[in-house]
Image (tube, helix red, strand yellow):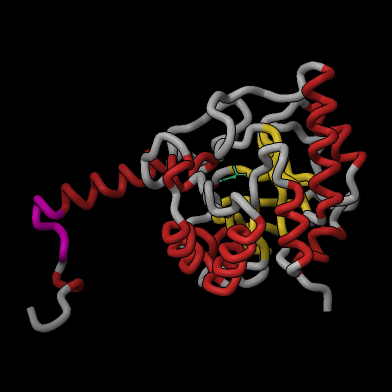
Amino acid sequence: MLNKIKKILLKKNKTKIVSLTAYSKNIAKILDKHSDIILVGDSMANVLYGMKNTHQVSMDNIIQHSLSVRKGIKKSLMVVDMPKNTYKNRKQAKKNAIFILRKTKCEAIKIESNSKNYEIISHLVKAKIPVMGHIGFTPQFKKKFKVEGRNNTELKKLIKEAKLIEKAGAFSIVLECITPKAANIITKLLKIPTIGIGSSSYCDGQILVTDDILGLSGFYPKFVKKYINLNTVIEKAVKKYSKEVKNIKFPKKNNFLYGK
Ligand code: KIV
């Protein structure tokens, strides 16, 4: 029986890998039917908590949401983001990664590259912890948003980074907001699957933040496609409920639990 990570690896050059983020059981349960990978992303900082960046997300935040997400997943591979400052050295990274894996029963963790932490990945992989890498725009380490790979120096740097992450033993790598050319070259060079966000269709798979595609987050840059405007749908339902409560149309007698 192939484990979930092997199944993801086998998709390379055969079928595209579908990935989305989830922070709760109800959403994870819906995604699970149509995704290969579900990420409990530290994007919860902006999306759920209204923080200005991902830097304040704690181990407790990530673990609580992962416990909820775990309850909604049966078939997808569950990956959990390691929060900023929880993998500053090998010892700390291993301790925290093991804690996340044991506590949440996720199958893998993701760590962002700071162009130096390859030996942390390799240390985790040696301890049998499956790691997903992340290069390009890595919000834990880069303050200013910028598409990377637009000149030769940046392109070479991205390729080197991707190769070193693969060499360190990561089973897959997120390419965030890099040029189509860079995504194409890296995807062709690596044996592990590349998962793109804002990085063209040349990647082996795609990931987006679920609240963005559902029209809930209010964050719709060019690389996001809003598949539905749930804000409007929810508002319509809430407006109707509000009106019915005020007009004593809800609850009706058939909603009463006992008697008349
Ligand atoms: O935190 C997150 O949601 C992510 C994805 C955008 C890749 O890291």
Decide: is 83 above or below 221: below
Identify the residue at image location x=18%, y=49%: 242
* Image side of residue 22 versus residue 182, left or right: left
Q: Residue 125, position in %: x, y?
A: 76, 62
Q: Hey, which residue is sitting farthest top in the picture?
A: 151
Quarter of the rendered structure image containing ligand 1: top right
In the image, 194 versus 110, the foreground residue is 110
**Image quadrant where residue 11 sits:** bottom right
Identify the residue at image location x=60%, y=53%: 87
Quarter in which the C terminus is drawn: bottom left
Q: Confirm whether residue 22 shows in the render.
A: yes
Q: Give the range drawn in magenta.
A: 245-251
Decide: is 23 above or below 133: below
* Image side of residue 10 versus residue 84, left or right: right
The verdict on residue 202 being magenta is no
The image shows a total of numbered marks equal to 0
* Image side of residue 33 versus residue 143, left or right: right
In the image, 101 versus 11, the foreground residue is 101
Quarter in which the N terminus is drawn: bottom right
Q: Residue 222, position in %: x, y?
A: 60, 25
Q: Confirm whether residue 25 shows in the render.
A: no
In the image, 224 versus 79, the foreground residue is 79
